[in-house]
Image: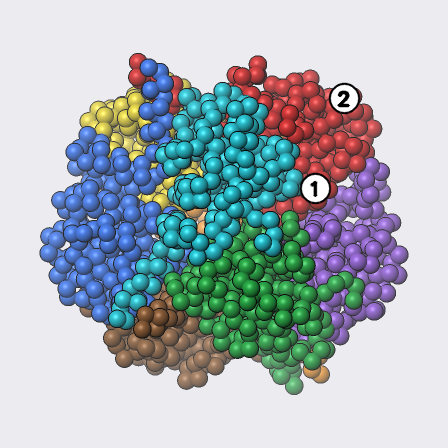
Chain colours: A yellow, B red, C cyan, D purple, E green, F orange, G blue, H brown
Amino acid sequence: MSYDRLTADNTAVLFVDHQTGLANGVQTQSPPEFINNVKALVTIAQIYKLPAVVTTSAHDGPNGPIIPVVEHGLPNAAIVHRPGQINAFDNEDFAAAVKKTGRKKLLIAGISTEVCVAFAALSAKHLGYDVYAVLDASGTWSKLVEDAAVARMVQAGIVPITWVAVGAELLGSWASPTGEAHAQLMGDHLPFSANNMAGYLSAKGASR
Amino acid sequence: MSYDRLTADNTAVLFVDHQTGLANGVQTQSPPEFINNVKALVTIAQIYKLPAVVTTSAHDGPNGPIIPVVEHGLPNAAIVHRPGQINAFDNEDFAAAVKKTGRKKLLIAGISTEVCVAFAALSAKHLGYDVYAVLDASGTWSKLVEDAAVARMVQAGIVPITWVAVGAELLGSWASPTGEAHAQLMGDHLPFSANNMAGYLSAKGASR
Amino acid sequence: MSYDRLTADNTAVLFVDHQTGLANGVQTQSPPEFINNVKALVTIAQIYKLPAVVTTSAHDGPNGPIIPVVEHGLPNAAIVHRPGQINAFDNEDFAAAVKKTGRKKLLIAGISTEVCVAFAALSAKHLGYDVYAVLDASGTWSKLVEDAAVARMVQAGIVPITWVAVGAELLGSWASPTGEAHAQLMGDHLPFSANNMAGYLSAKGASR
Amino acid sequence: MSYDRLTADNTAVLFVDHQTGLANGVQTQSPPEFINNVKALVTIAQIYKLPAVVTTSAHDGPNGPIIPVVEHGLPNAAIVHRPGQINAFDNEDFAAAVKKTGRKKLLIAGISTEVCVAFAALSAKHLGYDVYAVLDASGTWSKLVEDAAVARMVQAGIVPITWVAVGAELLGSWASPTGEAHAQLMGDHLPFSANNMAGYLSAKGASR
Amino acid sequence: MSYDRLTADNTAVLFVDHQTGLANGVQTQSPPEFINNVKALVTIAQIYKLPAVVTTSAHDGPNGPIIPVVEHGLPNAAIVHRPGQINAFDNEDFAAAVKKTGRKKLLIAGISTEVCVAFAALSAKHLGYDVYAVLDASGTWSKLVEDAAVARMVQAGIVPITWVAVGAELLGSWASPTGEAHAQLMGDHLPFSANNMAGYLSAKGASR
Amino acid sequence: MSYDRLTADNTAVLFVDHQTGLANGVQTQSPPEFINNVKALVTIAQIYKLPAVVTTSAHDGPNGPIIPVVEHGLPNAAIVHRPGQINAFDNEDFAAAVKKTGRKKLLIAGISTEVCVAFAALSAKHLGYDVYAVLDASGTWSKLVEDAAVARMVQAGIVPITWVAVGAELLGSWASPTGEAHAQLMGDHLPFSANNMAGYLSAKGASR
Amino acid sequence: MSYDRLTADNTAVLFVDHQTGLANGVQTQSPPEFINNVKALVTIAQIYKLPAVVTTSAHDGPNGPIIPVVEHGLPNAAIVHRPGQINAFDNEDFAAAVKKTGRKKLLIAGISTEVCVAFAALSAKHLGYDVYAVLDASGTWSKLVEDAAVARMVQAGIVPITWVAVGAELLGSWASPTGEAHAQLMGDHLPFSANNMAGYLSAKGASR
Amino acid sequence: MSYDRLTADNTAVLFVDHQTGLANGVQTQSPPEFINNVKALVTIAQIYKLPAVVTTSAHDGPNGPIIPVVEHGLPNAAIVHRPGQINAFDNEDFAAAVKKTGRKKLLIAGISTEVCVAFAALSAKHLGYDVYAVLDASGTWSKLVEDAAVARMVQAGIVPITWVAVGAELLGSWASPTGEAHAQLMGDHLPFSANNMAGYLSAKGASR
């Protein structure tokens, strides 16, 4: 390949603190947009069988439990409930779970972007991983905060990315075995794509 | 009741030209927001067993078929494929289908707000119906166009409304038989509501 | 007076469903702006000794308890926990509590603007009250929803207003007995006002 | 028809001060959006053979000549170069030209919305015409100014509208003789519409 | 004239609380935009010799003195320093000063839009004046507050307007004696207008 | 030249997946702005006779055919219909077509910015080309996605650019042989430029 | 730790020109948002006992005194009133006060972002400190100015950050001794956090 | 000094194509904001006696003459009318005029940001100058274009800056001989600053 890419074999995905209470603090996307994007990243993990590590911060307190779309969507994920550490890599179980995936490239999403994502990303970078911050599956309290977080991460060499690009880089070619599932992913989470498919099938039928 | 309200007995809902091709022209909400809101109105029609009339404009041409969420969500709706009339009430079958619902209050949503919704709304008002334009289940090409459409409709005495208000007016009380289904509707389409429920159940469980 | 105004003698204030869970769904102002504006309206009720009625919807469920700033700020308010009625005036205790205030003019704020505020406002208007919707002490899920709610209320003759105008109309003159408390209100909730005062005092002192 | 509508027989269109210098002051739409919308209204006048009156203010001075899309697009329009009157109806030639169209309904577009459009609209309303302000074929110096202008016109009973609604009301039915030309109009000025048509034709061809 | 208009003979202008401290609270326009628009309205008063009444609230306290552009620009204005009344018409000297102008139409601008402008406008309307709120020469603490204020005033029959429209209605025709001064006004406060004039003169010279 | 620039001799242009179905998913510019900018880049390719490679992804499926402005505007372009590869450089025919242009500098535009543009740009950079992402002739699903894509590309050393800058760098001097065609390009796609020209010619004529 | 972090032992905080007059010039956040964020940073300094240096520019002139929340919140801070130097590090007392903290990492906030923050940050970087610009506790005259300031600082290796991230990095773990105070900080300044806590406690109680 | 700064001795300022016709194409700031910022940079050049080079592109054609604020404000500037070169440094007279200033640091402002500013900046950087792009005294056709231009320049090591920062870096200390003129500059172009001064003087007087 002409540059070093995400593949189903070299990539793991980390969901950091997608908890119900924290999700209600997100103001950088509208709630329907945010939940849609988180769902899409979960589905990508399913389709590409990416090892996933899910972690929470004080999940039995006011931060709340894992949001259902993440919990139900990733039944095989390693789950690490952190008792207090804010940077997920400060938790040995989490760091071990990530290491155990054996993957070099880490996709990180979470709430909030400037804490849960950025701290984990900076640590992962320091540990030698290639780190991608999945920005649209992450959220925070204001646009100003998000912009500062992205600037800090980019400055540190972390790659900013969004779920459609993650999925497309993993897919590689529509002729791959995951092509059909991937098309379903796109239709379910990018509505114009479903519209195009329905219109196309209708037009083909109409000409019969 | 202290003012004249929407009830499950006096209300019908009209979906005007929610077609795949037209949906791709909507620029007044992001696509995930728009599809979420249309789905919610469809679900309200289901829960309250509102008579629904669905109509299309040239559905076998480039406007495309009915978007799946409307078509599949309203299996019992009357469907009127208009051969060319832009104002749905210019189509006799449509006008008859609406009349046949026997309802005095009409909820109208569609694409686009200033044509498909506004024209039908103005005609319905003229015919003596109480007319409500469901703005978030409708969309159009730009904010400027939407604002002009709303101003025109309000000027003509049409009531601007959005789906949460429609649903709440129909529900009346959480103690009503539709309360449980309504809570599901809210959780599915207002993500903070689902988060609150999950957090609440978790907190209750945590204290056991 | 040259037009019919809000006074401390003719006005009551209604807080409808300012509950913790619902507050987390507000997307029409940033959270610091919203809480600041609610606090200001609470303080106005204190300063002008306005009779206040606070009501909740399912406060022991996921909607959550009354937000502390309202609960603690209005220790003498009538509180009506509605078991299920969405329109507060459908609850007889609430309607009675409002009636008992003996006031003709009602300030209504709540979450959400298009349901809790608009429904109560439409009913109150129907019952013959002069109704003012305090928009910045209210909030809802999106700007589109808020705009529709305001348009619906204005169409029905409800007066749109915000807390600074409410306060100023009640104050009437800075020479009134509440002037000092009112100045404190302004400084606490409109930061530029506190800055002006501090700068003014400093400049006066500096010239001594 | 179920309400009083724009038709090719009862409607004239007025272009007020679409001049090159003034066009450069428009800040309410991006320049490509604005010119696109003006072109569309010009084309509607062509398709429906609407009598058009074009007027300018000091066109041989810094306001500049008529913008080419209006001048070339309406070769049969009456043109009235006003020597100084700001309100076009203060110019007798203009008022006479409008009267000579014999139409009851007037579409008015221009630069700027709050002066050239609003003044002419208020005068036309006063003279007994049905007046429609075509907002997206008009522009002005800021959003604040545009919003004030629309509010003033709506308050005075002038109908706010945009070109797609104007065209659709005139077309009435896609089966009318102007249907084909109208489809071309839509494709040329609403890009998603051309995309849908091209995609549709391609899909039909692909299935052969 | 074809509708009831602002003229130099029937119009007075009221500047309510354009004070330095209050001006620093304006967040509805950028400061350069706001000061530019206030200056323009002052200049209009000069050009058309409109009787002007300037009033302040506690000008020797933290609200600060009249902003220089108003104070220096209107040397002949009646100035009423209100000791405490918030609604300027509650001050007898102010009400008398306005009455003394002998004008039927009142232009009102001020800080803030929802208090100083709206209260005075509602009182003036009640007193039988034709009232115009000059929105771009007024400002307030947030867009939400401004929108509510405009909606309240429009609901009460007050005309929303902006300075270019005020000026143009007063000018009537560029051939009037004030034409030259008015052109200077436009060039000074609408930069594109000055650019057009300079470009025009240059082009004319270039062709000699 | 004082820095390494785009010239008609060292530059090729790549249009990646400008297809009708994908174009309907663009939400980062309004449709008239986007199509205007794509047209402009096509015209630049014509004027400077830049070798162009056009590529599609599943053009006979729901992504749809090449948008007409690209297809008709570049009759001599190499066209590579990719059967499935998402990164255009993964398709050997495409890579060969680019290589065959013999150019060192590549302008890349496409839909979507974060996939079709960014993937090709990263590969081209890796292959040793100087890469420029033409951002306004590209588009994607949301501003958040676009911002992430630009940050990723800039981080990787790809140059962000827009069509006016591309054209100006190629033109170098208005005295070059392409000056006249370039002026036409500017007038057609930057409306203020056409207005300036028309006003200038009018002013020159007026002074004769 | 897996990367070089802010700790209570290696960090000092500098408040540069948070003065009442300057605060009234901030247009990059709403006033309630800005004051909320400054307060939060002050509270962080208290909780973590960070050495703080507060400095002013001409505090006895029109820039005004230190805003109360900073002055009262940091009773132990070193305060340096600069007689004229704009870059705080040009003042020897200030430079000495910073040096005396003995800390390697400096958090800098101030008004304005591009002058008071950026100049001090560039100097501190040059002097060998690790520099963090706390963007949400800083403000300036427009978004354009803020964006330029952030870009300049990031280009120079200064880390962009916001108060929640500052606090979280200092806290490290909720199990640390400052955990309780930190939770109070979050509740007081991120309203959703207080709502979550109140809802959680209510739900736990409700299940008893 | 603790970092390499702009001083009155090491800095020259270049105004590139601030022409009337081009100014009318600026859509990245409102016209009053833009002209205000250009004026401020001109005044800075006056106060600090910075050598200035002004250049135009086809000033006797539709681009129009130099905008008056630049032409009249810089009577001693070198003026180079370029016959056709787009990059000002491609014109030998311009390059010589810049070299003749003998300054190492160049402030560059112009219309448009991505062409006139960016091209000159890239060339100047290549020639060994320290280059600062003064973004608020520059403008272009859209935010998207401006953002791309800034990203390109920052990537190339050009410093993004705005006029207040330029002025403050040149001033250094309010105690410098230019302090009084600088205070006037601030008051004239940052309205809150003039308000603060007037309020301060009033408060001091009030306490006598």
Q: Which residue is mark 2?
A: B102
Are the residues flagged by discs 2 and 1 from a single subunit?
yes
Q: Chain of mark 1?
A: B
Q: Residues within 10 Å of mark 1 (few under 14, many from 20)?
A: many
Residue F148 appears anywhere in the view: no
The one nearer the camera, D195 or E102, is E102
Judged left or right of residue F122, residue D29 is right
User: Residue E115, image x and y in percent?
Assistant: 52, 54
Q: How far apart in space, not on screen, are marks 2 and 1 (Cα)?
A: 23 Å
- Residue at 60% across / 55% down in the picture? C2
Amino acid at the residue labelled 1: Met
* On screen, residue G67 above or below B145: below
Which quadrant does the C terminus of chain E fall into?
bottom right
- Residue at 45% across / 80% down in the picture? H73
Q: Residues within 10 Å of mark 2 (few under 14, many from 20)?
A: few
Determine which of the numbered discs, if any, sits on residue B153 in the image. 1
Judged left or right of residue G127, residue H130 is right
User: Residue B187, image x and y in percent?
Assistant: 49, 24
The one nearer the camera, A93 or H73, is H73
- Residue at 78% across / 27% down in the picture? B94
Judged left or right of residue E132, residue H108 is left
User: Residue D25, image x and y in percent?
Assistant: 60, 64
Disc with the residue nearer the chain's start (2 vs 1):
2
Amino acid at the residue labelled 2: Gly
- Residue at 27% across / 58% down in the picture? G66
- The reply to whether callout 2 and callout 1 are in contact (CB within 8 Å) is no
Residue A159 appears anywhere in the view: yes
Element class at badge 1: helix
